[in-house]
Image (cartoon, coloured by chain):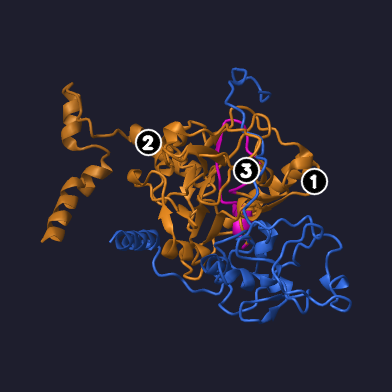
């Protein structure tokens, strides 16, 4: 009931906002914003790899050492990575591919490159994924009526610790002060 | 029937041709000779002449004198822009361009801000100041980020714009950035005694800085504290000036006028996002065309929990707050 009332409210709000401006003019000048359609590949900047870490097959070439598929921890390797992302139930090879470390894999087994990692994230975070495709979750730059650039999930959220990091705020505004009176004499404040 | 009645009245109020040519009715001339006061409505030939001259002068002054940018012709606007460009280029020692981009047909701008994402980092404030040539000293900032208590909800009497912790977000606080809400029923444009502020067809509320008399009625009328007054001559260092300007937007303001957010009119009329939208590190700020069903704004209105600030005032803002989660 509450949800219904709310949706009515939103409809009324939209209708109110549109009222008085007539029909939405579908002119060539008013280009539609290009939201990414479901299934379409989204152009993103390259993933934010740490320096010298990619390609992973530089070390993980699977020639000398066969991949060990047993779930375990690594006290000595990749010490910079601390998993805080459903760590009770997940480990490296749930996302990284054991046979080819330069790609990721979906739950279906489909291998995907790192610049399509949003599909991997979208498997669990479907709602966020939909919002991101619509341009509502995450930062977008470019044109409101044309080409927009997206960011990958991992540009803002570390895949191993996805919680958004606290930030240092920019300086607070100064409290209001009374300027010196100049009695309208000149423009020198 | 009504028409007939009206025409009869019109005939009755008009003096007969003979009387008009004589300058004054015969009865009046008789009255004057007898020493009685003439009726107040009558005019002597001399009085009529001076009133007509005054009216003609007034008409000429109105027609040829200064005008608001709202009413100015395209040619005169182009001339004014050339003058400004020359003036600003000289002042800042940099090539300044002043755009006169008109509203795009079929576009009504709207803005949305995700309250569940904003973490109060004030990157938007800094970007806005740089983009829109706001005064550095005394400080003028169009965006004001309010820190509020999660237990109390949105409560303006308890809001703190001066929060300065080491790190944001602070526990138990949430942040409500405010700027001009670009109301459809804007109180500020109604109270302006000289018509120096108005709503453009694409929904942006703008100010003519040359027509503003600095009475600050609009600031009193705005329930969001979105308008700012230049108490002193704004200071804008040449190395920090944004040379891409719009005549209704970020061109330098003189002392004694009011200014406010224009949704970066110099960017958005060229199809770009406002500066605050592009800079927000949490992606909380969204902007688009309310009339385009494919826009982010429409997606938010249709799928998210949306609220307005002070909706009880019936200002009908085009600035929506929503919860992205």
A80 sits to left or right of A185: right
Q: Nearer the viewer, mark 3 or mark 1?
A: 3
Q: CA distance from mark 3 to mark 1?
A: 32 Å
Residue B204 is one of the magenta-drawn residues: no
Q: Nearer the viewer, mark 3 or mark 2?
A: 3
The chain letter for the residue carrying disc 2 is B
Rendered view: B223 above or below B265: above
Per the image, the residue denoted by label 3 is B121
User: x%, y% of residue A66?
Assistant: 82, 77
A162 sits to left or right of B223: right
Rendered view: A68 above or below B280: below
Residues shaded magenta: B248-271
Tell me if residue A35 can be seen: no
Q: Nearer the viewer, mark 1 or mark 2?
A: 1
First of labels 3, 2 by sequence position: 2
Q: Quadrant of residue B277?
A: bottom right
């Amino acid at each position: 009931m509450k949800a219904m009332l709310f949706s009515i409210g939103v409809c009324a709000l939209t209708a109110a906002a549109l009222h008085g401006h007539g029909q939405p003019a579908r002119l060539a000048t008013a280009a539609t914003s290009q939201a990414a359609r479901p299934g379409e590949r989204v152009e993103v900047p390259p993933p934010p790899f740490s320096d010298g870490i990619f390609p992973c097959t530089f070390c993980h070439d699977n020639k000398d050492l066969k991949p060990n598929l047993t779930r375990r921890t690594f006290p000595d390797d990749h010490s910079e990575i601390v998993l805080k992302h459903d760590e009770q139930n997940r480990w490296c090879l749930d996302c990284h591919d054991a046979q080819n470390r330069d790609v990721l894999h979906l739950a279906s087994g489909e291998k995907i490159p790192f610049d399509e990692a949003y599909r991997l994230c979208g498997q669990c975070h479907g709602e966020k994924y939909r919002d991101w495709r619509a341009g509502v979750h995450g930062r977008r730059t470019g044109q409101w009526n044309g080409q927009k650039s997206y960011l990958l999930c991992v540009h803002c959220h570390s895949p191993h610790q996805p919680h958004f990091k606290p930030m240092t705020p920019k300086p607070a505004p100064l409290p209001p002060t009374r300027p010196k009176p100049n009695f309208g004499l000149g423009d020198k404040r | 029937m009504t028409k007939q009645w009206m025409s009869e009245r019109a005939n009755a109020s008009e003096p007969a041709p003979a009387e008009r040519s004589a300058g004054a009715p015969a009865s009046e001339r008789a009255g004057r000779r007898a020493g009685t006061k003439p009726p107040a409505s009558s005019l002597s030939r001399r009085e009529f002449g001076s009133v007509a001259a005054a009216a003609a002068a007034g008409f000429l002054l109105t027609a040829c004198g200064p005008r608001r940018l709202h009413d100015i012709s395209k040619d005169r606007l182009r001339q004014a822009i050339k003058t400004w460009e020359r003036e600003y280029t000289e002042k800042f020692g940099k090539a300044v361009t002043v755009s006169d981009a008109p509203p795009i047909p079929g576009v009504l701008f709207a803005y949305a801000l995700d309250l569940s994402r904003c973490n109060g980092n004030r990157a938007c404030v800094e970007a806005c100041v740089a983009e829109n040539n706001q005064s550095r000293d005394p400080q003028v900032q169009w965006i004001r980020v309010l820190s509020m208590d999660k237990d109390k909800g949105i409560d303006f009497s308890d809001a703190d714009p001066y929060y300065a912790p080491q790190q944001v977000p602070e526990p138990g606080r949430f942040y409500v950035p405010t700027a001009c809400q670009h109301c459809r029923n804007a109180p500020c444009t109604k109270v302006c005694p000289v018509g120096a502020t108005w709503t453009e067809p694409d929904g942006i509320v703008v100010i003519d800085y040359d027509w503003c008399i600095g009475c600050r009625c609009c600031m009193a009328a705005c329930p969001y504290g979105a308008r700012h007054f230049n108490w002193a001559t704004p200071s804008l260092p040449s190395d920090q000036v944004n040379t891409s300007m719009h005549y209704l937007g970020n061109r330098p303001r003189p002392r004694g006028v009011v200014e406010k957010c224009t949704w970066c009119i110099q960017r958005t009329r060229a199809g770009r996002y406002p500066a605050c939208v592009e800079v927000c590190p949490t992606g909380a700020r969204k902007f688009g065309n309310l009339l385009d069903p494919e826009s982010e704004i429409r997606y938010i209105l249709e799928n998210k929990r949306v609220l307005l600030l002070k909706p009880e005032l019936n200002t009908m803002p085009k600035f929506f707050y929503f919860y992205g989660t």
